[in-house]
Image (spheres, rainbow, N blue to C red):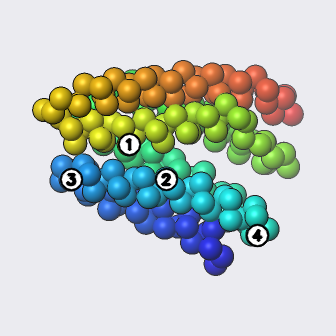
Amino acid sequence: MNLPNKLTLGRVIAVPFFIAAYLLGWYILALIIFIAASFTDMLDGKIARKRNLVTNFGKIMDPLADKILVYSAFCLMVGDGTIQAWMLIVILAREFTIAGMRTVAASEGLVIAAAMSGKIKTVLQMVAVPLLILAAALYNTTLYFYVYVLAMIFLWGSLIMTVYSGVEYVVKNRHVFRA
């Protein structure tokens, strides 16, 4: 297994540790784990492209590892009331729709590349989550309000991009359903 794939696998392995830290209220540790795992997402792609180490495992597991990390955080945040359940439902509905379309496309021998709007959505989510965790860590301090507001800006931005990128994806790839 090459280094980028090890980094991707490391991101998946980090998720239970992130979940445990968050559930125990160790928000700073959860934040550190989340940021470190997010950093591996950027790093594994750069290394894979630079060293020509792109693999089928990486193509499948890299975006899946991102989703496992981010959506685990969102599930935890729905559980403690940090975000509303409908927000997660919108996010997951988009993911399931796109996964279904990719499955249909793959069965026809087609590969549908990720659009820039989906990448922007992911970045916004990966900024919103640590800000929300930081806000939890700063609860009952003077900085809480400012961090929380900033986190909400990124969360709402990610929701807008979730809907936009989902609609864009369906419209651009509607030919998949005509086959």
> In the rendered image of this protein, does residue 143 appear above or below residue 102?
above
* Crowd tier of the residue under label 3, counting other residues whose Cα lies within 10 Å: few below 14, some 14–19, many 20 or above: some
Tags 3 and 2 in contact by the CB under 8 Å rule? no
Q: Earlier in the sequence, mark 4 or mark 3?
A: 3
- 21 left or right of 121? left
Spatial CA span between label 4 and label 3: 37 Å
Q: Which mark is residue 38?
A: 2
Q: Mark 1: which amino acid? A: Pro
Q: Earlier in the sequence, mark 3 or mark 2?
A: 3
* Crowd tier of the residue under label 2, counting other residues whose Cα lies within 10 Å: few below 14, some 14–19, many 20 or above: many
Residue at image mark 4:
51
Q: Which mark is residue 26?
A: 3
Q: Position of residue 107 (x, y in %)?
A: 79, 48
Tags 1 and 2 in contact by the CB under 8 Å rule? yes
Determine the residue positioned at 71% across, 65% down. 48
Spatial CA span between label 4 and label 2: 21 Å
Spatial CA span between label 1 and label 4: 30 Å
